[in-house]
């Protein structure tokens, strides 16, 4: 899995991202995300988040833009259901169905 840097357009926090498919994204946070992201600060203050990295709308929009710009590659995944041969519709069509 090759991670690519993506910078949030709002807070400037840089994370490493790997798109596994159009629907699946892996994000590796670097230190200090709670301090850099205003959304995380607000959520933590409201006791809605207890550390660790999820995402915020601004970062998700930045990731989506990186995909649209071609800076973040997405594996060939025509239907958005995963890699061919790993739980894909093509693989399911070749498996015998239980009776």
Image (spheres, rainbow, N blue to C red):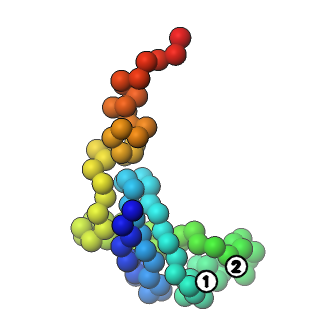
**45 sits left or right of 62 in the view:** right
The mark total stands at 2
Check the image and report above or below for 82 versus 20: above
Looking at the image, which residue is at 43% across and 74% down?
A: 16
Residue 38 shows in the view: no
The answer to whether the residue labelled 2 contacts the one labelled 1, judged by CB atoms less than 8 Å apart, is: yes
Check the image and report above or below for 17 versus 7: above
**60 sits left or right of 33 in the view:** left
Q: Quadrant of the N terminus?
A: bottom left
Check the image and report above or below for 7 versus 75: below
Q: How many residues crowd around disc 2 within 10 Å: few (fewer than 14), some, or many (20 or more)?
A: some
Q: Nearer the viewer, mark 2 or mark 1?
A: 1
Q: For numbered disc 1, what is the local secondary structure? A: helix
Residue 97 shows in the view: yes
Looking at the image, which residue is at 44% across and 60% down?
A: 25
Which percent across, then down, holds residue 24? 44, 55
The residue labelled by disc 2 is 44
The residue sitting at the top extreme is: 99
As measured in the structure, the alpha-carbon distance from the residue carrying label 2 to the one carrying label 1 is 8 Å
Which percent across, then down, holds residue 50? 72, 74
The residue labelled by disc 1 is 34
Looking at the image, which residue is at 37% across and 53% down?
A: 21
């Amino acid at each position: 899995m090759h991670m690519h840097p993506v910078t949030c357009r709002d807070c400037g926090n840089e994370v490493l991202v790997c798109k596994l498919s159009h629907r699946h994204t892996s994000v590796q946070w670097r230190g200090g995300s709670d301090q850099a992201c205003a959304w995380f600060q607000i959520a933590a203050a409201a006791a809605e988040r207890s550390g660790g990295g999820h995402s915020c709308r601004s970062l998700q929009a930045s990731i989506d833009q990186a995909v649209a710009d071609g800076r973040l590659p997405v594996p060939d995944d025509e239907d958005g259901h995963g890699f061919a041969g790993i739980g894909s519709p093509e693989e399911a069509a070749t498996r015998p169905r239980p009776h």
